[in-house]
Image: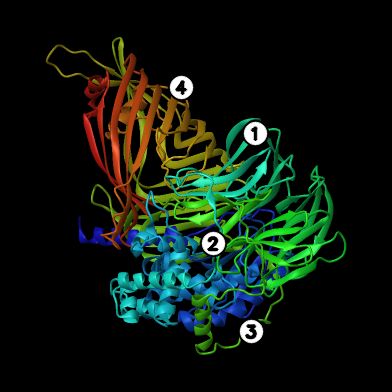
Amino acid sequence: MSVRKIVLLFAGLVVSAAASAQFYSGGEDPASVRWSVSRSAHYKLIYPRGMDSLARVYARSLEYYRPLEAPSSGYLPGGMYRRPLPVVLHAFGGSSNGSVAWAPMRMDLYTLPEAYGPEPLPWTASLAVHENRHVSQMQFGADGWFKPFKWLTGELFAGAMAGIYPGSWFLEGDAVVAETALTPYGRGRRGDFLNYYRAAFDQGDWRNWYRWRHGSWRRYAPNHYALGYLTLAGARYLYDEPLFTADYLRGAARHPLRLRHIQRAFRRTSGKKFQPAFRDIMQTFQDLWSAENRGPWTPGEALDPAPAWYTVQASPLFFDGSLARLEHSKIRPTRLILRERGKERRLPFSSATGDLRTDGKRLYWSETVPDLRWGLAATSRIRYREDGKTHDLTRSGRLYNPAPSPDGSRIAAVEYPVEGGTRLVLLDRDGNRLQQIPAPDGVQYVESAWSNERLYLSFIAGDGGSGIARWDGAGVPETLLAPQAVSIAHLQGTADGLLFNCDRTGVGEIYRLAADGTLYQLTATPYGAADFTLQGDTLWYSAQTRDGVLLHKTAALADRPVDFAAVAPHPVADKLSAQEKALTPPVAADTETWSEAKPFRKFPGIFHIHSWAPVYFDYDRIEQLSGDVTWREAGIGATALFQNLLGTSSGSVGYSVHKDADGRWRHAGRFQMTYTGLYPVLELSADIGDRDLFQYRRVRQESGSMALSFLSGQPVEKPSFRASLRAYVPLNFSRGGWHRGLIPQVSYTFTNDRFNKSLPVLTVADPLEGSSSFASLSRLEPGDNVFMQRLTLSVRGYQVLGTAASQEYPTLGIGAETGWQTRLGLEDLYSNTFFAYLYGYLPGLFPAQGLRLTATYQHQSGAPTGENAISAIPRGFQDTRLSSWLAAHAPEQVKLTADYAIPFSLGEWSAFSPLFYVTHFVVKPHADVLTFAVGRGFEGHGTLLSAGAEVTARLANFLWLPYDTAVGFTFDWNGGPDFDFVAEQGTELARTWIGGVFTVDF
């Protein structure tokens, strides 16, 4: 391989990493949404028309926190760029989130407040401080030695550097540090954020950093948010270094060729290597937690023996005389476990739900249900189970956390309208609205619970903090517990008050609020108690252990009076806040500048070019649902990438110069675009000049009673042109834990290659033996010279369960696709092809194993030239001539496949970190069987077989790519009753195949 090709391939890999991380779209807002744009001092807000007040609130919060980020991060958000940072408000979605992308440069804020166990901080402030920190972090990619690349590649390079240098754990961990240090709240003060580390450290689980970062197939590890915070907050606390992030980012920008930047940062800060310093951090947290005086512990008895796989058991309650609960684990997606009609049922269940609640006859919950078409639109429905069936109580709106009254006649829920704010809604048993009680401005209602005719409410105050109020049926709810810097969740009413969960002691515990306002603490647990239900004198609750969050029970309740305002200190978080205050005071924020709202036009920004490169690379696209990236070529030329700010349009324009097979230099262009802003998704691509166009023609030779027809193609010295358009509608019917969809699609391909349908008929003389044959033109059957075009129509449907963390395949599922393909204008010469594809998943013999089965069928019409719509060759047959032979001579084909996934662990291999980290291995035995009906010169049926296995090591990262990677090999043995016959037809089949496997899950 030449040096030039090596460099270009390396450039392609770097850009692909950036593409997967930065060319990001969280979905599409409904096409009917009209948009407005306004500007604050440093941000350009793009938001749904009519939501000016909501946009103004976000602008003030963003501007307020902007200067606060700079001292400890080293960079002012957006300070390296002159133009205001675009901020897009997505108001119709079903998730609470935010993101910062750098190609194109923008911030996406999903304005739905968190409804299930939120932080005690208004959602606007939470997003502003966290996402502003990400903007700060991105600045280093345009500083120092990186600065010239801003002009050379646009916005692409800074995004790529964020993935290569700090990585996701650093970016997210530092953002959590910021939200904890710059507010009195933040996840660093939440009792459930680091509680697994409490249990692990206390029981001697002292893994090295890489094993905590990547986990394993078998062992649980908290996510990169928690580890990032533990690492960076621990460094700032233990070594009193508030500028740790600033020094790291500036160091990367000024010395980009230095390796192991994080190790250098820890050595500079602590005087120790990274791993010993991290062990000191773990020990520091353990010492702080051990010094807490929260005992004596409430004695608790586990409901079940410790499971073999990390398991979370949640939302226990008694329904129909037995204990129901939600459960998920590393080998099982979420399930509802209950006893119904005398039998235990384990039902698939959505993970996007709140607590289970019951009135004794119905089991209620709220569930986020995606829109039929739009990825950024959803409803949160009240659903219930009764008489063994699941029903929708509501089908519209965004209603959360239902609380049925004791007699079941009313259901209280909290609603989050798209325009902002919250309100309490009362429904009757049929889902009709009885009453609405709006929350005061800036207050977020979260949960409710009935106590006789009174309704208790948890809320988050406008300036932060969680509290509890009571509503007596009229007027304004009365505050009983004034807001504090604590989290409140899982409200349950009793005959004389309220039970709830709160982390005021540093971990979640269960409390009782009496009708007279006295607060009692019922539990004291080593690592926290979460979901619960009280049955008689026995409390059932979920408690953190090393094996999971598991159900326990106790009758020994403390029931001791406590002061709600007496919140335990958070030594690490408090020191972070003190460090921020001690840094150079930032410039005062401009929170009042606000321009007049103007319409934001969708069309002009469709081709917003954000990045470019002085090389050509073929960037196919990042698929909306799967995140798949395909790279086909890198070479001399140039490429420009575009994506609009709404995330509905993306694509690329490329120019390349390359040599063809004849050694001639060619100038070629490529354009591709995906547009998701209409009801059908449109994908357009076009190529010009990559080769010469081809002129195809047919010839017929006759000799006596014998005749032979054949096709030929000759290049014409004119540039080729190829364009394709694909339109599909991804309809989403998912709910209840099942992913369901229907995808009708049509694709059309046009080329300027021509097919001359005229038929010259040659007569071949039959001279004496030893003489030459003579051919003469006997007649010419006229025909048109038509363009080569292809049309494909298909529809796919699927219904599958989710895939748990340790599974290769979904636990259960089925899908099917059927379609038809034709060549327009050439139907009499090229076969029309009908195809069908069926696939399914079944559980394996042991946990985490799974079986995948497929069946493919295609049938060609009786035209003289055959074409396949899909490939049906068994996977061990790598010779492409077999595919051509089957297309030409097998008008009917059936392929069956079976794959059995066997993941297994040989321990976590961290010795090669940070180059790569092995989490586990997977062996996939597989077998393919192809049967085909032979025609067009041959007669009969045929069968080919292929059997083998794929063996891969699964890596949590590979070099600078922080994505799951599979590395290994696949081997197959090929055979079948008709192997020799097919091999004799010029296909040169091999009995064995061995190939390498290298895949990266972007």
> Disc 1 vs disc 2: which is toward the camera?
2
User: Could you say which disc has been placed on residue 297 in the image?
Assistant: 2
Residue 266, percent from left and from top: 34, 76
Q: Is residue 742 above or below residue 894?
A: below
Marks 4 & 3, CB-CB < 8 Å contact: no
> Disc 2 vs disc 4: which is toward the camera?
2
> On the rendered image, what quadrant is the C terminus found in?
bottom left
Which residue position holds label 3?
A: 590
Q: Give the class, few, some or many, for how many residues have Cα within 10 Å of label 4's Cα (few <14, many ≥20).
A: some
Q: Give the class, few, some or many, for how many residues have Cα within 10 Å of label 3's Cα (few <14, many ≥20).
A: some
Q: Is residue 583 above or below residue 291?
A: below
> Disc 1 vs disc 4: which is toward the camera?
1
User: Could you say which disc has been placed on residue 340 in the image?
Assistant: 1
Q: Is residue 98 shown left or right of residue 973?
A: right
Marks 2 & 3, CB-CB < 8 Å contact: no
Q: How far separated are the C-alphas under marks 2 and 4? A: 76 Å
First-in-chain label (4 vs 3): 3
Which element is circle 4 on? Answer: loop
Which residue position holds label 4?
A: 861
Q: Is residue 995 above or below residue 282?
A: above
